Amino acid sequence: MKTLDIIALVLVIIGAINWGLIGFFQFDLVAALFGSMSAVSRVVYALVGIAGLYAISFFAKDKYTDVE
């Protein structure tokens, strides 16, 4: 995996964990760590969103790399 792919995957996992916590326990981990809609938390949310969009490309990569 390329470094960018690993970073994107880690950010997507962080986002998924945060959404799971929100859904199950109504607890926003990012807001708890960095403040509700502070500059840092907004950057974290933006990076997770960008990583999610980038992760869409994983489907295309997987489709063409498994050709035998």
Image (cartoon, rainbow, N blue to C red):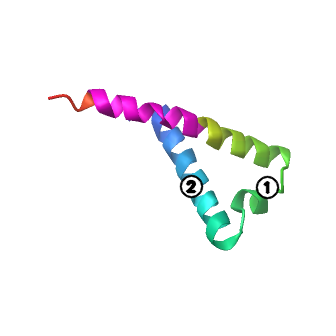
Residue count near mark 1 (Cα–Cα under 10 Å), binned few <14, some 14–19, many ≥20: some
Q: Is residue 18 left or right of residue 27?
A: left
Percent position (x, y) of residue 61?
36, 29
Report the amino acid beneath label 1. Phe
Residue 14 position in % (x across, y down): 58, 53
Q: Residue at x 84, y 44 (%)?
A: 39
Q: Residues within 10 Å of mark 2 (few under 14, many from 20)?
A: some
Residue carrying label 2: 16
Indicate whether 44 appears above or below 35. above
Quadrant housing the N terminus = top left
Magenta range is 51-64
Instruction: Identify the secondary structure beneath mark 2.
Output: helix
Nearest to N terminus: mark 2 or mark 1: 2
Q: Is residue 6 magenta?
A: no
Residue under label 1: 34
| Residue sitting farthest toward the front | 23
Q: Is residue 8 left or right of residue 65?
A: right
Q: Hey, which quadrant is residue 62 in on the image?
A: top left
Q: Residue furthest left?
A: 68
Q: Position of residue 57 (x, y in %)?
A: 45, 30
Mark 2 or 1, closer to the camera: 2
Rendered-image quadrant of the C terminus = top left
What residue do we see at 58% from left, 59% from top?
17
State the predominant SS element of the stretch in magenta: helix
Q: Say above or below: 10 vs 26.
A: above
Real-space Cα separation, disc 2 to disc 1, in angstroms: 17 Å
SS at badge 1: helix
Disc 2 marks a residue whose amino acid type is Ala
